[in-house]
Image: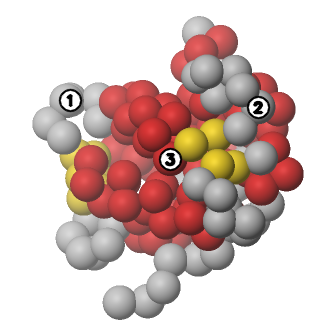
Amino acid sequence: MRFAATILAACLVSLPLATGALGQGASLQDQFAAIDSDGDGSLTVAETIAFQRKVFALLDQDGDGAFSRAEFIEILERQAADAGADAAQADQRGGIWTQRFDGVDFDQNGIVTTAEFDQAHEFRFESKDTDGDGRLSFAEFGAVALPRPAE
């Protein structure tokens, strides 16, 4: 369960989503360490995408290679409830999550595919790699990513 909590917490950062109660399960350092599969203290695009594929698998509960906005919000709201989040703030969280989902749903069809998910995370990686060395330091990882350009 700790692995699932770490993955979902990292998902909150990686999409990015509102962390709130959901982000409390894993610190930024824990998230970085979970993604840094070779333990060298930096992240590559390959490590980031490999980790995000695990996140995708949790979101794609039926294994069809995609997840809908409704599925996404349902999963995150269930996690929020399990973490003791205030039910009165569900609409506010749902609005934030909808906005985050829409930022990854490039074709705006209400479905996020593996390709869209990978593309979003590759862009986020590149936007955080401020020194252009193809690796993210912990400082770069913790920085706010640039928004995806409008199409």
Could you tell whether 24 is left or right of 18 in the image?
right
Tell me the SS state at disc 1. loop
Could you tell whether 107 is left or right of 140 in the image?
left
What amino acid does circle 2 point to? Gly
Identify whether 119 is placed above or below 65: below
> Which of 109/151 is in front?
151
Residue 106 image-quadrant placement: bottom left
Residue lying furthest front in this view? 133
Residue 146 image-quadrant placement: bottom right
Label whose residue precedes the other's in the sequence (1 or 2) = 2
| Residue 124: % across, % down | 56, 62
| Residue 141: % across, % down | 74, 50
Could you tell whether 86 is left or right of 45 in the image?
right
Residue found 81% across the figure and 44% down from its top: 138
Tell me the SS state at disc 2. loop
Real-space CA distance between mark 3 and mark 2, rounded to the nearest whole angstrom: 14 Å
Q: Residues within 10 Å of mark 1 (few under 14, many from 20)?
A: few
Real-space CA distance between mark 1 and mark 2, rounded to the nearest whole angstrom: 34 Å
Which residue is under mark 1?
62
Residue lying furthest left in this view? 64
Label whose residue precedes the other's in the sequence (1 or 3) = 3
What amino acid does circle 1 point to? Asp
Comparing labels 1 and 3, the label whose residue is closer to the camera:
3
Residue 96 visible (yes or no): no
Residue 45 visible (yes or no): yes
> Which of 13/73 is in front?
13
Numbered mark located on residue 45 in the image:
3
What amino acid does circle 3 point to? Val
> Which of 56/43 is in front?
43
Which residue is under mark 2?
41
Contact, CB < 8 Å: mark 3 with mark 2? no
Numbered mark located on residue 98 in the image:
none
